[in-house]
């Protein structure tokens, strides 16, 4: 995936991109394997559908009802209200339907009339001879004036062509009549128990003189539907007979400047401006309204985000906003042995400086990385990590987690974390040492009790803070190309060995399982759909959560 290394993407449970074990029986049941089975399946980040299944943590939401991650495909958007982006005036839904999703109240009073005026280019509606009698329902007044102008100077012999809206209305009316004529009339007694064909046949055979077959023969056959034949039925015929109008338009375009002709964006701004070729023929278009939306989970009636309705549109406060980063442990990875200088964001003058290409990872060389897990909730959690021995994809790399099971402390207040970190750093500095040692420790990230030759050990965490724990991963990258053999390869084997886009990216799928306990009186979730809730003997509620994530480490080089 196109991202800056290193990165961490999370998989939503709505997508199933797991690869089963290599058995003949399980190969037939690829789509039936659940996502929460890490021992039998592995998430494949190189699958073509992975680009639509993986997302950064800041783009995901969390459903408290289902206790699951929710992506853009897992929730629907509902419109709360409409508003004008210029003055932030809220428009009721009845006004939106009547005015066509556009603002209809703005103008300036001139001689007991109202006009439209642009303070940027000094344009006003007086330039085209348009004024309004009231400052409301401007869209309706514009439509009436445009209709009167197009149909006012026409005679009976020379009729003007119908507008876009009128042609569409005639076409819709024509097809409604065709559907009513060709189809069977609706049965007014559809809810009656005697509307069934079997019941009707039995009743007709008992009390009627005619049978059901005789009634079918006497019934009139429906006429087939036909197409529209004229403008009254909605058919618009392209004609080149009106040469006078075309010649006048061409003459005007030759005499005027290029700036006086309309652009494609202006012609597509509204149906009224579709046929305008000169700027003088353009009609004012009302400001398109904006909407405030809420997000609701597709699997339950829970709101994932809901703006505060008591506040104005300009205020961005939310009444409900369930972000995934406030409920899901955050994972981050970095190299233990940094072989290149990291750019300091404070000294980067351009955005491209932060996106500089990192050196490629050499294959078959063991590298160690630090995986940090941060806890966003107020209870300590038990983390269990699982990863395949070899990464899925064309290039197989070996991955080993030295400490797959550990605990992470609870998250606290921001001020508590700042005070605890400062107190810890002051306690580790012995008396008599100057600021030079403290500055070196802050630059290197090592404490006074840590030696430079510290080595990772199996079963032990690397670093632990109040709400984060770091463990070490050992990765042996695979080679992009296999070693040449004695027997030459066939054309089919050579085609299979060709690298595709993204095959050189080292991505490690990690299955994360989190467990924690809360008191039953503080458990506001209760028995909910999809949530796993186990009440212990001591009265605490045991909760658990599991998800897949992908760690983007870097690109594998061709060296070997």
Image (tube, helix red, strand yellow):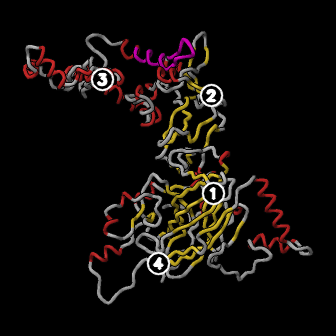
- Which disc, if any, is residue 87? 2
Mark toward the start of the polypeptide (2 vs 1): 2
Q: Is 130 situated above or below 403?
A: above
- Which disc, if any, is residue 413? none
Circles 2, 1 touching at the beta carbon (< 8 Å) = no
Magenta span covers which residues? 130-147
Foreground mark, 4 or 2?
A: 4
In-front residue for pair 176/266: 176
Q: Please, what secondary structure does the residue beneath circle 2 have?
A: loop
**Which residue is at 21% across, 24% downward?**
196
Q: Which residue carries the number 3 mark?
A: 172
Q: Which residue carries the number 1 mark?
A: 516
Mark toward the start of the polypeptide (3 vs 4): 3
Residue 551 spot, x, y in % from top left: 54, 65
In-front residue for pair 152/82: 82
Marks 3/1: CA–CA distance: 60 Å
Q: Please, what secondary structure does the residue beneath circle 4 have?
A: loop
Marks 2/1: CA–CA distance: 48 Å
In-front residue for pair 549/356: 549
Q: Which residue carries the number 4 mark?
A: 478
Marks 1/4: CA–CA distance: 37 Å
Q: Residue furthest front?
A: 537
Mark toward the start of the polypeptide (1 vs 4): 4
The reply to whether the magenta stretch includes residue 135 is yes
Circles 3, 1 touching at the beta carbon (< 8 Å) = no
Residue 434 spot, x, y in % from top left: 89, 73
**Which residue is at 46% across, 55% downward?**
53
Quarter location, residue 366: bottom right
**Which residue is at 47% across, 59% downward?**
36
């Amino acid at each position: 995936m196109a991202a800056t290394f290193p990165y961490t993407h999370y998989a939503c449970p709505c997508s199933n991109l797991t690869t089963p074990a290599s058995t003949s029986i399980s190969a037939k049941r690829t789509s039936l394997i659940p996502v929460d089975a890490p021992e039998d399946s592995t998430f494949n980040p190189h699958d073509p559908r992975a680009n639509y299944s993986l997302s950064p943590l800041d783009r995901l939401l969390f459903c408290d009802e289902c206790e699951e991650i929710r992506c853009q495909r897992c929730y629907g958007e509902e419109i709360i209200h409409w508003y004008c982006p210029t003055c932030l005036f809220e428009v009721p839904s009845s006004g939106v339907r009547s005015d066509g999703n556009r603002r209809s109240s703005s103008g300036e009073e001139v001689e007991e009339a109202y006009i439209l005026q642009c303070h940027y280019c000094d344009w006003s509606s007086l330039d085209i001879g348009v004024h309004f009698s009231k400052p409301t329902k401007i869209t309706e007044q514009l439509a009436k004036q445009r209709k009167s102008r197009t149909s006012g100077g026409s005679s009976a012999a020379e009729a003007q062509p119908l507008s876009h809206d009128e042609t569409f209305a005639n076409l819709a009316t024509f097809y409604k009549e065709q559907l009513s004529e060709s189809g069977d009339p609706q049965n007014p007694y559809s809810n009656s128990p005697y509307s069934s064909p079997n019941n009707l046949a039995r009743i007709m055979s008992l009390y009627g003189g005619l049978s059901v077959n005789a009634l079918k023969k006497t019934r009139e056959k429906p006429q087939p539907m036909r197409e529209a034949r004229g403008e009254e039925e909605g058919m618009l015929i392209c004609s080149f007979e009106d040469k006078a109008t075309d010649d006048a338009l061409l003459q005007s375009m030759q005499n005027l400047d290029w700036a006086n002709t309309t652009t494609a964006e202006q012609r597509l701004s509204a149906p009224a401006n579709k046929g305008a070729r000169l700027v003088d023929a353009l009609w004012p278009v009302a400001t398109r309204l904006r909407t405030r939306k809420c997000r609701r989970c597709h699997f339950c009636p829970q709101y994932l985000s809901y703006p505060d309705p008591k506040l104005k549109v300009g205020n961005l406060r939310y009444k409900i906003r369930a972000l995934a980063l406030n409920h899901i442990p955050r994972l981050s990875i970095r190299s233990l042995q940094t072989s290149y200088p990291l750019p300091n964001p404070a000294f980067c003058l351009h955005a491209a400086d932060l996106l500089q290409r990192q050196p490629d990872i050499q294959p078959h060389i063991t590298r160690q990385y630090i995986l940090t897990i941060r806890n966003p909730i107020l209870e300590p959690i038990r983390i269990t990590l699982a990863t395949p021995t070899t990464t899925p994809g064309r290039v197989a790399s070996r991955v080993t987690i030295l400490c797959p099971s550990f605990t992470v402390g609870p998250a606290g207040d921001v001020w508590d974390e700042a005070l605890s970190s400062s107190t810890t750093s002051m306690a580790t500095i012995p008396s008599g040492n100057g600021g030079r040692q403290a500055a070196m420790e802050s630059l290197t990230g090592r404490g006074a009790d840590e030696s430079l030759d510290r080595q990772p050990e199996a079963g032990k965490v690397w670093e632990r803070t109040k709400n984060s724990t770091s463990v070490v991963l050992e990765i042996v990258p695979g080679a992009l190309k296999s070693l040449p053999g004695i027997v030459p390869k066939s054309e089919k084997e050579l085609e299979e060995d060709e690298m595709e886009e993204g095959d050189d990216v080292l991505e490690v799928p990690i299955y994360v399982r989190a467990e924690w306990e809360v008191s039953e009186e503080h458990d506001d979730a209760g028995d909910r759909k999809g949530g796993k809730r186990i009440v212990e003997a001591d009265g605490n509620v045991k909760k658990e959560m599991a998800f897949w994530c992908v760690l983007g480490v870097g690109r594998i080089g061709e060296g070997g």
